[in-house]
Image: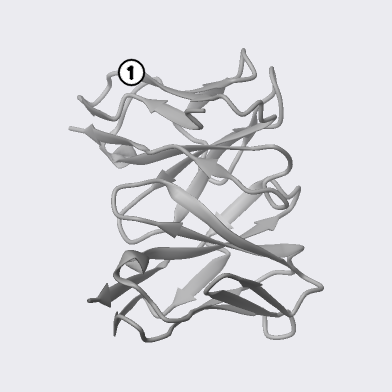
Amino acid sequence: NAGVTQTPKFRVLKTGQSMTLLCAQDMNHEYMYWYRQDPGMGLRLIHYSVGEGTTAKGEVPDGYNVSRLKKQNFLLGLESAAPSQTSVYFCASSYGTGAWETQYFGPGTRLLVL
Amino acid sequence: SQQGEEDPQALSIQEGENATMNCSYKTSINNLQWYRQNSGRGLVHLILIRSNEREKHSGRLRVTLDTSKKSSSLLITASRAADTASYFCATARGNNNDMRFGAGTRLTVKP
């Protein structure tokens, strides 16, 4: 099992450009999450999904959109990238509710917005 | 806003010593989790302690929870160089999917 994988591993964008980050999991988990991690800070939840076709906002959703068309995939989109979105993005998945179940994390995507 | 706050921010010890990290939080919780992050990697779940539990063990890890003080501690006994990592506490608020992580404690174990 690959667990949670993220594509791409690293990306450089210019301000105003758009991109999509892909998260895939092969554990048949219902719940999936997108976090961002900035230097010296913990993870902050951007969006999450409790099942195929559902999404919900987390702590810092502005500037991002998500989609969960397939159970195994969770996409994070940046429509118009800004330097403030320079960060490391982590995807995670869990069998059940995040507070009660182990979250499994991907290796991260480093994004630099110039 | 961060729910959990770890203390200290950084800790450096010799191999074989014990390492203690603390986490304080602000609102009532159902449970609290600890995660480890090796440099440049994703987080790995270590342990979950429920609000009605006071202490939990897993191998060399010992976690305590004091809901009256809104604090938790993570003890790593007989530390090894491989324990070098950042450690985060995480709590859930609201609908229990909105997880909040602290800024972490960076542990360095010198061989």
Q: Which residue corresponds to the image point at 38% horizontal and 77% vertical from the top-left?
A: B79
Quadrant of the rendering where the C terminus of chain B is positioned: bottom left
Residue drawn at (34%, 73%) of the image: B80
Identify the residue at image location x=74%, y=85%. Answer: B68
**Rendering quarter of residue A39:** bottom left
Residue at 67% from the left image edge and 56% from the top image edge: B92
Res. B26 in view: yes
Q: Position of residue A114 (x, y in %)?
A: 17, 32
Q: Which residue is mark 1?
A: A18
Q: Is residue A7 left or right of residue B72?
A: left
Helix, strand or loop for disc 1: loop
Q: Is residue A99 found left or right of A59 in the rendered image?
A: right
Counting labels gives 1
Name the residue nearer the viewer: B97 or B84: B84
Is residue B103 among what the camera can see?
no
Residue count near mark 1 (Cα–Cα under 10 Å), binned few <14, some 14–19, many ≥20: few
**Residue B48 in the image: above or below residue A111:** below
| Amino acid type indicated by mark 1 | Ser
Residue A80 quadrant: top left
Name the outermost residue toward the right. B52
Q: Is residue B102 above or below residue B52?
A: above
